[in-house]
Image (spheres, grey):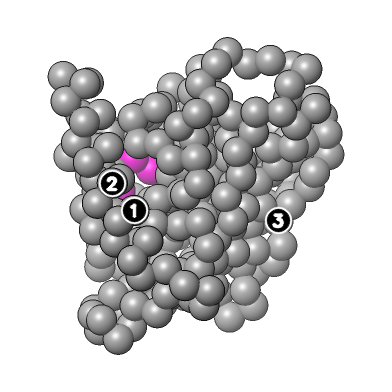
């Protein structure tokens, strides 16, 4: 069954890359002129918009060394429960301290809460390199060997309320907990927080991820790094 899922995921990637390659240029790709209902206004850099959600987001299921993927998960969705955000204010979130410090990562962020009954849009971002799938090597990590990096910028039609990126145990697993409310029944989400670790770590040496939310909240600048793990997070937007 997983082989079939991987096949369809790879087919989706090939079609998306073909479209992306035909339309890519040095300036941002403006989507406003093509479909007025598009919530994403423009993208720039190493990013591909998926027209349809993938069947699986498990480790090594949807991979590309040079691009991250984004897809619309929920549109005009009314929250049935309060939703925890890990990043909720404009700013530049980054720290390249060489020693990973999970607590320091969360201290850098700006947690917040969206109350139930609020209408939102949700987009899911996924980056999993295809090449580096060996076991973790500490020396390689310290020497920045085997890591893959993508850089992208996304501008939305609506303001960004925040990002859900924290994976962990119990109540700290904000990303995994939000799957119950925002996840799609057709998508297999990765909730293994010990081996594949689907979340984000901003204070992680060579693998430090970076998020810049513009002052007007419409544009996100992203830098994501992976080796044997993959990056996943949700972008929550204000809805009319």
Other residues around mark 3 within 10 Å, as few (<14) / some (14–19) / many (≥20): some
Instruction: Say if 91 sits above or below 198 in the image.
Output: below
Element class at badge 3: strand
Using the image, determine if residue 102 lies above or below residue 105. above
Q: Position of residue 100 (x, y in %)?
A: 76, 30
In the depicted structure, whether residue 225 falls above or below residue 168 = below
Checking the image for residue 14, the label placed there is: 2
> Residue 104, image x and y in percent?
77, 39
Q: Is residue 228 visible?
A: yes
Q: What residue is shown at x 29% (from left), y 61% (from top)?
A: 19
Residue topped by disc 1: 17
Q: Is residue 14 left or right of residue 131?
A: left
Label 1, secondary structure: give it.
helix
Residue at numbered disc 3:
93
Q: Residue at x 80, y 27 (%)?
A: 143
Instruction: Name the spot of residue 140 as percent of width and height, x first.
Output: 73, 21
- Judged by depth in the image, the label closer to the viewer, 3 or 1, is 1
């Amino acid at each position: 069954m997983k082989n079939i899922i991987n096949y369809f995921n790879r087919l989706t990637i090939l079609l998306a890359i073909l479209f992306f390659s035909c339309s890519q240029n040095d300036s941002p790709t403006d989507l406003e002129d093509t479909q007025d209902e598009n919530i994403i206004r423009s993208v720039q850099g190493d990013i591909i918009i998926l027209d349809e959600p993938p069947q699986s987001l498990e480790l090594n299921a949807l991979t590309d060394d040079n691009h991250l993927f984004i897809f619309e998960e929920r549109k005009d969705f009314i929250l049935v429960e309060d939703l925890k955000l890990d990043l909720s204010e404009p700013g530049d979130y980054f720290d390249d301290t060489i020693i990973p410090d999970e607590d320091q990562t969360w201290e850098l962020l700006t947690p917040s809460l969206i109350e139930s009954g609020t209408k939102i849009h949700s987009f899911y971002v996924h980056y999993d390199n295809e090449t580096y799938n060996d076991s973790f090597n500490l020396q390689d990590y310290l020497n920045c060997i085997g890591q893959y990096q993508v850089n992208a910028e996304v501008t939305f039609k609506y303001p960004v309320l925040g990002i859900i990126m924290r994976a962990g145990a119990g109540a700290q697993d904000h990303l995994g907990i939000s799957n119950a409310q925002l996840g799609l029944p057709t998508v297999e989400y990765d909730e293994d927080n010990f081996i594949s670790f689907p979340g984000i770590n901003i204070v992680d040496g060579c693998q430090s991820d970076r998020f810049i939310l513009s002052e007007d909240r419409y544009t996100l600048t992203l830098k994501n790094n992976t080796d044997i793990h993959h990056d996943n997070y949700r972008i929550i937007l204000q809805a009319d």
